[in-house]
Image (cartoon, rainbow, N blue to C red):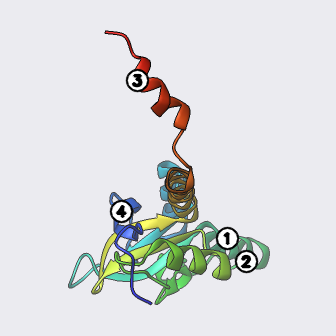
Amino acid sequence: MCPRPDLPTARDFMVRHVHTLTPDVRLEDAVSFLEKHAVSNAPVLAEHGDPQALVGFLSERDCLEHLSNDAFYERSETPITVRMMMKRHPICVPPSADLFTLATVFYQQGFRHLPVVEDTHLIGIVSRRDVLQAMFDFWKQRRHDASNEHSPPDLTEIANLRFIMR
């Protein structure tokens, strides 16, 4: 299928300022970080080498799983780090991913956020809410365009033009 030029892409509505973590951050610091920035997840970037290379993705769910296991089994000897909790090789989208592709990924996979990656570099993040808003805006525009295309002209306005007084 050929992409349509009027179709928004991830690049059009992704969030470019993204709060990120590194793999060696400890569990308690990661939870504090998510709370401080009021985010439910964070991409994890490489500590060494390319600083924009995405190496994983950490969510509140990941933290909750490890916190509850650690508390329940009382395993506090070994510090838990982001490296141990994060999802490695997260599903990512390119900035050119169109709106319908993104919507499909979100509703079929149940994700809330996806990293936007060009080559291996994190350039943004797109959320299900971002896609919903973009889809709603696109839908409204299409309905507006369709109503203008298929509506016959109002002949009374045209007929009344001859009676305009100067």
| Location of mark 1 (residue) | 67
Q: Which of marks 4 and 2 is in front?
A: 4
Which badge, 3 or 4, comes first in the chain's sequence?
4
Nearest to the observer: residue 139 or residue 102: 139
Q: What residue type is labelled 3?
A: Arg
> SS of the residue at dot 3?
helix
Which badge, 1 or 3, comes first in the chain's sequence?
1
Residue 81 visible from this viewpoint: no
Nearest to the observer: residue 165 or residue 8: 165
Which badge, 2 or 3, comes first in the chain's sequence?
2
Mark 1 to mark 3 CA distance (whole Å):
78 Å
Mark 2 to mark 3 CA distance (whole Å):
81 Å
| Location of mark 4 (residue) | 12
Which badge, 4 or 2, comes first in the chain's sequence?
4
| Location of mark 3 (residue) | 162
Query: Toward which corner of the image does residue 45 lie, by quadrant?
Result: bottom left
Q: What residue type is labelled 1?
A: Leu
| Location of mark 2 (residue) | 69
> SS of the residue at dot 2?
helix
Q: What residue type is labelled 2?
A: Asn
State if disc 4 and disc 1 touch (CB < 8 Å).
Answer: no
Q: Which of marks 3 and 4 is in front?
A: 3
